[in-house]
Amino acid sequence: MLGVGHKFPAFSLQATVSLEKGKAFQTISDEDFGDKWKVYFFWPKDFTFVCPTEIAAFGKLNGQFLDRDAQILGGSTDSEFVHHAWRTHHADLKDLPFPMLADVKRELCSALGILDPQEGVAQRATFIVDPHNVIRFVSVNDLSVGRNPQEVLRVLDALQTDELCPCNWQKGEEALKVSI
Amino acid sequence: MELEQLLNHVPEYAKDLKLNLGSVTRQPELTEQQTWGTVVACAIASRNPQLLDSLLAEAARHLNEQAMFAAKAAAAIMGMNNIFYRFRHLSGNEKYASMPARLRMQVIGKHGSDPADFELWCLAVSAVNGCGVCVEAHEKVLRDKGVNEETVLAAVRIAATVHALAAVFDAQPAPAAATV
């Protein structure tokens, strides 16, 4: 499984982005969000019980993530049509503000190393990826354990509080190189 | 109120400041953007609403949107960092220097304007807010970036003048809505 410091794998996947006719699907790749942070989270199967709760919880915090220049991307090994059907039939998922990736060929999940060996579906993995596409945080829960999106937000905050100001410079140190 | 109109209300005892403002905004050591960005940042840091209004309106004639944003950002972020890092320094307890700031300061890396100009505005605000470590650190970064002492001091002249004028207007506000 890929860990902190690894590059997030390149991908190009179909995604369900809305319920609006003709605008439901979109191809999304790792390069679509420019210099934003990305929060990827995967769940095992659409239409199961634990999933909608935590997906909706991420949805509720979407504005907070956007404030922090972070794009949320959910995903599973289900197809974009299954995602669409799930969203259509589940009140909590109707207005989901972020794309649901359809990793039908399991290439992304395999590259990430999060395919469950028994079930063959995505484990409940979360990745925070920085604007340079480097993984800065990983967590994986067992298939039956839901996540706490507030905790993901807290970690993102912590990752973004680098002391970028030269004021942090200590006597005797090299001058701080502010990355611009 | 137009800047010129406001300056007519500078009392006789502060006439030097009024004349200084005219001259420090025309120093050959500074580019137009450096000059007016410094004015904006220092006007915010100096907190007098009348002076701030007039200077912002005047500065808008000299700055593009990005520079205006960056100058305001410099005032905002240094309003925080000057307090934080000054405390670290003044407390005399070295333990604080090894503890994380845990404060967001992302704008330092993504204000979108010229990095050296942004440093200059941060330095000017640090001079207004009176943080020794920040003055030292930003001055050093500016010199490393090839900005000379003449330019730095020219910006500090602006800081000093704007700050003094703000104090005068605090003590003696211009009569409101003086219709001419």
Image (cartoon, coloured by chain):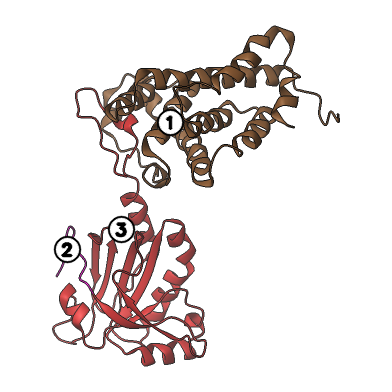
- The amino acid beneath tag 3 is Pro
Disc 1 on helix, strand or loop? helix
Q: From the viewer's side, name the closer residue of B52 and B65.
A: B65
Residue beneath label 1, please? B122
Q: From the viewer's perspective, is the residue at label 1 or at label 2 nearer? A: 1
Residue beneath label 2, please? A3
**In the picture, which chain is red?**
A
Tally the numbered discs: 3
Disc 2 on helix, strand or loop? loop
Instruction: Tell me whether marks 3 and 2 sit on the same chain.
Output: yes
Q: From the viewer's side, name the closer residue of A94 and A47.
A: A94
Q: Looking at the image, which residue is at 15% across and 86% down?
A: A118
Instruction: Verify whether residue B145 appears in magenta.
Output: no
Residue beneath label 3, please? A131
The percent position of residue B130, horizontal first and vertical second, equals 46, 20
- The answer to whether mark 3 and mark 2 are in CB contact below 8 A is no
Residue A47 visible from this viewpoint:
no
Q: Residues within 10 Å of mark 1 (few under 14, many from 20)?
A: many
Q: Which is more N-terminal, label 2 or label 3?
A: 2
Magenta part of the chain: A1-10
The percent position of residue A9, horizontal first and vertical second, equals 20, 70
Chain bearing tag 1 is B
Q: Looking at the image, which residue is at 27% across and 66% down?
A: A127
